[in-house]
Image (cartoon, grey):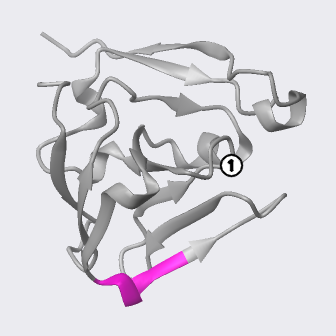
Amino acid sequence: MDKNINEIDGACHCGTVRFHVRLKNGLHSARRCTCSYCRMRGAVAVSANISDITILQGEDALTLYQFNTNTAKHYFCSKCGIYTHHQRRSNPQEYGVNAACLEGISPFDFEEMPVNDGTSHPSDRGKDASSELAGILRFYPRQ
């Protein structure tokens, strides 16, 4: 896997929603989170600036979900239910993009995955607080 990918196309499971994204730091920004929503969703997210994602098809099929402070905006396909991207609470100028929606990328391509402490959100700890690491997930494929 080339973690230095700069631009890539993506889609939901059924292909209704298609997009093109320019990633901030390639796949190097991949991470998971322990907040209540991310824990249940289980997706690997990579970073992109708000202006660097273009919905090519199916924008009308995207459904928005918000909770708690209603700062983060989670988008998913209303046809197949797959989460495609979200506007981050920790940085509203960024999207987290579901890595599994990117062409040729699987969450199981990442040998190690940093997991951010989302249960103690940086926005709740004060402006100078940075996101803390809750742990590391590792994937060991069968030989």
- For the N terminus, the image quarter is top left
In the foreground, 132 or 81? 132
Q: Residue furthest bottom?
A: 60
Horizontal relation, residue 124 to residue 87: left or right:
right
- For the C terminus, the image quarter is top left
Q: Is residue 1 magenta?
A: no
| Residue 74, image quadrant | bottom right
Tell me where residue 136 appears, x and y as whole percent: 51, 12
| Residue 125, image quadrant | top right
Tell me where residue 96 appears, x and y as whole percent: 47, 47
In the foreground, 33 or 14? 33
Q: Is residue 9 above or below residue 114?
A: below
Tell me where residue 97 appears, x and y as whole percent: 39, 50
Residues rendered magenta in the picture: 58-63
Tell me where residue 70 appears, x and y as whole percent: 77, 64
Q: Amino acid at mark 1?
A: Arg
Horizontal relation, residue 135 to residue 62: left or right:
right
Determine the residue positioned at 42% across, 49% down.
49
Q: Is residue 27 visible?
A: yes
Horizontal relation, residue 45 to residue 25: left or right:
right
Task: Kindly state the secondary structure of the residue where label 1 is placed.
Answer: loop
Q: Read off the residue under disc 1.
A: 89
